């Protein structure tokens, strides 16, 4: 069965015009489509049209502004997710090594799922082999000392997803110790932190791979407490909306220091001033989010 036919840039522009989109600067629009892909761009126009017909006021520049806003927004979020990732790795390595020694992470019996533990370590070992010729700290431990790498250095070979899985299969005592550092109480604290780490993994992967965050509905929603849920926007049915990005931002507020989160918030505010057309409710932000966060 044949797929969709190839369309030239000019044909793509004509399709947009036929659907009611105003294109004021044709050369600029042509260049933008060439470098950014018509199909990719279409996701950013969903809020500007209904049944494939654009609203009367919609322009090509509106789509470009939304696209560029989302691009810069992802980079801001990634910057602070990196801080969270480094903190998680550092705290986990400290608490685990304190309990089981610098290289105890290599012993499967310290984990509740030996098969998953093996997968994580095998993946990290492949990373080590690839990076060994280029990383001074790896050369020091492997070539100079001939030793296994202590966990506080080994975590640099792990992704945020790896550390999330490693935490999930660690002993309850380790999980509780790490959770306490992040201000979460024993018992439910470890499961809450586990869900936070999973949430950060979802957002990190989307941002790192350039996926659209604008107007995205998340199937896996972050776990929020009552105070955080009260900060959510309401959907058309009057229900609290935890399906957009804003819920994940509330998790980041929990994981970052007050000063770091203030910088993140200020960066988002500056971005909204740069692109005033972009509506933040499509990220799940309430109208009073600047005052409430």
Image (cartoon, grey):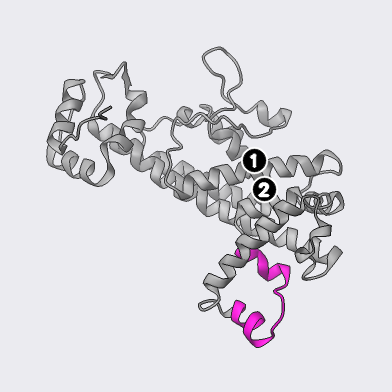
Q: Is residue 102 above or below residue 249?
A: below
Q: Nearer the viewer, residue 13 or 133?
A: 133
Residue at image position (52%, 54%) is 79
Reading the image, the residue beneath label 2 is 255
Residue at image position (34%, 39%) is 67
Q: Is residue 207 above or below residue 44?
A: below
- Answer with the quarter of the image where residue 71 lies: top left
Sort mark 2 into few (<14), some (14-19) or many (20+) by Cα contacts within 10 Å.
Answer: many
Residue 84 visible in image: no
Q: Residue 162, image x and y in percent?
A: 64, 54
Residue pushed farthest top? 237
The residue stretch that appears in magenta: 137-157
Q: Nearer the viewer, residue 63 or 263?
A: 63
Reading the image, the residue beneath label 1 is 251
Q: Nearer the viewer, residue 113 or 23?
A: 113
- Answer with the quarter of the image where residue 228 lies: top right
Quadrant containing the N terminus is top left
Residue at image position (51%, 77%) is 134
Q: Residue 236, image x and y in percent?
A: 51, 14
The answer to whether marks 2 and 1 mark residues whose Cβ atoms lie closer than 8 Å is: yes
Q: Nearer the viewer, residue 22 or 257?
A: 22
Secondary structure of the residue carrying numbered label 1: helix
């Amino acid at each position: 069965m044949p797929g969709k036919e190839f369309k030239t840039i000019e044909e793509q522009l004509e399709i947009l015009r036929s659907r009611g989109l105003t294109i004021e600067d044709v050369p600029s629009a042509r260049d933008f489509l060439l470098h950014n892909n018509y199909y990719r761009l279409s996701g950013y126009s969903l809020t500007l049209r209904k049944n494939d017909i654009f609203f009367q006021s919609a322009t090509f520049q509106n789509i470009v502004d939304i696209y560029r806003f989302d691009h810069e927004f992802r980079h801001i979020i990634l910057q602070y997710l990196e801080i969270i990732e480094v903190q998680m790795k550092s705290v986990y390595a400290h608490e685990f090594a304190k309990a089981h020694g610098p290289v105890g992470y290599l012993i499967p019996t310290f984990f509740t799922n030996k098969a998953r533990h093996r997968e994580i370590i095998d993946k990290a070992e492949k990373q080590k082999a690839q990076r060994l010729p280029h990383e001074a700290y790896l050369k020091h431990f492997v070539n100079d000392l001939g030793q296994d790498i202590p966990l506080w250095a080994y975590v640099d070979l792990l992704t945020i997803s790896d550390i999330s899985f490693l935490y999930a299969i660690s002993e309850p005592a380790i999980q509780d110790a790490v959770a306490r550092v992040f201000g979460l109480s024993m018992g439910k604290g470890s499961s809450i932190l586990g869900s936070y780490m999973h949430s950060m993994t979802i957002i990190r992967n989307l941002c790192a791979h350039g996926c659209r965050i604008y107007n995205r509905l998340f199937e896996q929603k972050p776990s929020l407490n009552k105070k955080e849920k009260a900060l959510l926007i309401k959907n058309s049915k009057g229900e609290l909306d935890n399906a957009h990005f804003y819920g994940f931002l509330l998790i980041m507020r929990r994981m970052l220091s007050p000063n770091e989160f203030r910088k993140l918030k200020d960066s988002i505010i500056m971005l909204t001033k740069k692109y005033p057309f972009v509506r933040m409710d499509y990220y799940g932000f309430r109208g009073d989010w600047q005052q409430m966060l």
